[in-house]
Amino acid sequence: MPRKEILEAVQKYVDPFRVTKGQGFQLKDFDPADTRGLKMNKGDAAELLRRGSEWLAMEQDMLYAQDRWSLLLIFQAMDAAGKDGTIKHVMSGVNPQGCQVYSFKQPSAEELAHDFMWRYARRVPERGRIGIFNRSYYEEVLVVRVHEEVLERQKLPAGLVTKRIWDERLADIAHFEEYLSRQGVVVLKFFLNLSYKEQKKRFMERLDRPEKNWKFSASDVRERKYWDDYRHAFQEAIGATAAVYAPWFVVPADNKWFTRLIVAAAIVELVESLDLQYPKVDAAKKKELAAARAELAAES
Ligand code: ATP
Ligand code: MG
């Protein structure tokens, strides 16, 4: 199938999950188990994903060679939604030299001594690179919003902590992303939308299967008690920061194969739209290449 047709086919699946306008956004309109009626066996899904990753690898090569745009891919989700696996599978084909993954955990003392954006801003990918944020500055309006004691650790001057703080932070994030977009950093944000029920199932698996035990953390089960607070925080965050220049994708996460396909498709679709090309070789460069070739050929 020609690439254009594949892209059009892919678009049909990605479109329903893309949010570029916050107005009227309702998280509850998105079904975590949705697969758009697509039924696939594991083998077919894996094969399609493999092709998507190959495609992405090809585009990444041009992104790197061109050295103008960069791509910032943000992954946010509740625990066990499959962030790590999705990143691993979707990026499996790309050249590690052109790709930087950062996992943001609880901030260090040094990080807490700075403004909240500091530790994220310094990890924004260089030109020509793909940067992946496994968690991101969105934690500053998610976990920090859900747990007030986390905000206290940030040592803000008391007068700046008002009930408007979350709206202010969301506005700051939206501005930051607009700024990035004007710098040639293309921002895509993925919320892996897992259901409460499926999360329980995955936690159970981590407890019951020895090879998955290492993934289990008791604190994840404690966080589950704040499910509704997190949903509310996500709803607010996506609503306030969805934009054409920094779209959100609310990706169904109850079926891993579908999650991975949609994420891969969204990225491929985006890089295609950049219309990347290898840098043009001008006359002077051509001459230089020819001379080098002649020199090599003349070696005895
Ligand atoms: P996994 O569990 O798959 O290894 P993870 O992203 O859940 O990956 P953990 O080390 O389990 O990694 O958890 C990181 C923790 O750090 C999360 O609970 C998250 O809420 C917390 N965290 C991330 N950013 C911040 C922040 N800015 N302030 C406070 N806590 C944060
Ligand atoms: Mg965790």
Image: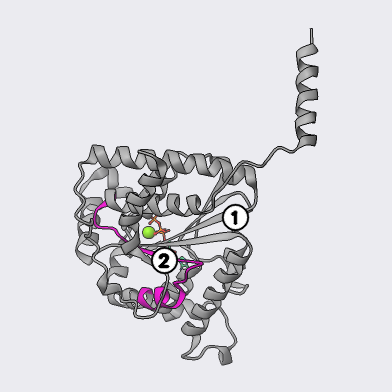
- The span from disc 2 to disc 1 (Cα, nearest Å) is 19 Å
Q: Which residue is mark 1?
A: 125
Q: Amino acid at mark 2?
A: Trp
Q: Is residue 281 on the magenta stretch?
A: no
Quadrant position of the N terminus in the picture? top left
Q: Is residue 190 above or below residue 57?
A: below
Q: Nearer the viewer, residue 156 or 199?
A: 199
Q: x, y (%) of residue 114?
A: 62, 72
Q: Quadrant of ligand 1?
A: bottom left
Q: Is residue 258 left or right of residue 278?
A: left
Q: Is residue 155 left or right of residue 105?
A: right
**For the residue labelled by badge 2, is the local secondary structure a helix, a strand or a loop?**
strand
Q: x, y (%) of residue 144?
A: 45, 75
Report the residue at 31% width, 53% height from top.
259
Q: Is residue 178 above or below residue 56?
A: below
Q: What is the crowding at mark 1: few (fewer than 14 residues within 10 Å), some, or many (at least 20)?
A: many
Q: x, y (%) of residue 184?
A: 61, 60
Segment tinted magenta in the rendering = 234-256
Quadrant position of the C terminus in the picture? top right
Q: Which residue is mark 2?
A: 248
Q: Amino acid at mark 1?
A: Pro
**For the residue labelled by badge 1, is the local secondary structure a helix, a strand or a loop?**
loop
Question: Marks 2 and 1: which is nearer the front?
Answer: 2
Residue 94 visible to the viewer? no
Q: Any atom of ligand 1 within 8 Å of the CB at mark 1?
A: no
Q: Is residue 36 above or below residue 210?
A: below
